[in-house]
Amino acid sequence: MALIGTTILYIFIFLSVYVQVFFFVTFLENRKKIIIRKGETKLAHYPKVTITVPCWNEEKTVYKTVRSLLDLNYPKDKLTIFLIDDGSTDNTFKVISRFSKYSNIKVFHKENGGKFTALNFGLENSETEFFGCLDADSFADRESLVRIMSYFEKDKEVMAVAPSVTVYNDNNFIQNAQRAEYYMGVYFKKMLDFLGAIDVTPGPLTIFRKKVFNDLGGYRHGHNTEDMEIAYRMQRNNYKIAHCNDAYVYTNTPGSIRKLYRQRVRWIFGFFNNTIDYNDVIFKKDYGNFSVFTLPTRIASVVAIGYLSLRILYNFGNFIYSKYIVYKIVGFSIHPKIVFDPFFINTQSLFFLFIITYFLVFFSMLFGRRMAEGKWALSAGMFYYFPVFSIVSPFWLAKAAYNTVLKRKPSWR
């Protein structure tokens, strides 16, 4: 039995190292294609774009969200902004109504139906060639839109372009850990772009050709992750999704373990159920790296976290039980003297595999920060990330699995 457990552990560690090395090799092969622009970006032609801001109880952040759109380096006569109040119960509608005086802004109010219905409402009223969304708790960098649009100008086959999303607020160690995670996300998103395997078109300012929705239909509920569902649908239909690494969008993140837990339960629940809905594409070469790399590695990582969590829990239980037996036999004793002996350093291959994996994870954070902030530097959050997410992620993973099995929909917040 122990041999089986050890074998499974080695398989998961091997897969972890393989994925990280694969991303690193992808980086080495494509590093010269990663351009980080400074200053203003100009286009030969400025297409008309509609950006929808779906709002539900966002009175505290939506004003700054809209101001960031008004400050974009993009011709005002080419940019239409829809502010859609999705049945808020606070003062959100009152706040967004202040922008009705702007000629390129339209303010709407509708009954609450969920974010995807607000986005579809925007689609129905949009008359432009390009359409996008900016979440009401996020803020766009001045150059973000024009840099995204440069990808469409350069490649006519690109159907959607996602930005680099980073953390706006980092007031405590929970948000610092998330900042490091978002750095890593910027790096991985760019590598998935090179592989043609992006699996999420995030709500903060992903821009689509309107043709995507004309051909494939509007947004769907997507188990409360409509940005993942539309990406899956696009990949199934071989529509190209790109990532603009120097288009920056800043988002508010949960400031407590409880809020982070609720957010991630929803995200993982969405992953489980969207993957179940699109299970027919897995390992099908016709759907490219999305089906033979992204989805299998995502599934393997979830299984690995679940297995390792159970193994750690089992080993911890055994440790506590063994100490209890010792206590019953010899009583309580303290051994304060600790002597370091290099003889006891673990030199097994498993230890070195862990070191390689962590090194590559740190590299992904560092280079993600390089792309997001233009500098190579460690941050405290990079060290917070491992203990925070290692302790908490098994719980939201278990809850998402539980909800999936019992078909219980998690709350939005």
Image (cartoon, rainbow, N blue to C red):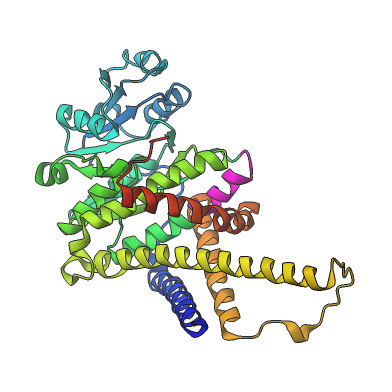
Furthest residue to the left? 215
Q: Residue 93, position in %: x, y? A: 36, 16
Q: How many numbered discs?
A: 0
Q: Residue 45, position in %: x, y? A: 22, 41
Q: From the viewer's perspective, tell me whether residue 352 is left or right of residue 113.
A: right
Q: Is residue 62 above or below residue 161?
A: above
- In which quarter of the view is residue 327 placed? bottom right
Furthest residue to the right? 337
Q: Quadrant of the C terminus?
A: top left
Is residue 236 magenta-colored? no
The residue closer to the viewer here, 172 or 406, is 406
Taking the spot 54% from the left edge, 79% from the top edge, the residue there is: 353
Q: Is residue 261 above or below residue 341?
A: above
- In which quarter of the view is residue 157 placed? bottom left
Taking the spot 38% from the left edge, 44% from the top edge, the residue there is: 266
Q: Which residues are magenta?
A: 171-183
Q: Residue 397, position in %: x, y? A: 44, 54
Taking the spot 43% from the left edge, 32% from the top edge, the residue there is: 137
Is residue 176 magenta-colored? yes
Q: From the viewer's perspective, tell me whether residue 274 is left or right of residue 260.
A: left
Taking the spot 47% from the left edge, 75% from the top edge, the residue there is: 17
Q: Is residue 167 visible?
A: no
The residue closer to the viewer here, 332 or 48, is 332
What is the magenta segment's predominant secondary structure? helix
Q: Is residue 297 visible?
A: yes
Q: Residue 287, position in %: x, y? A: 19, 65
The residue closer to the viewer here, 119 or 222, is 222
Q: From the viewer's perspective, tell me whether residue 315 is left or right of residue 117.
A: right
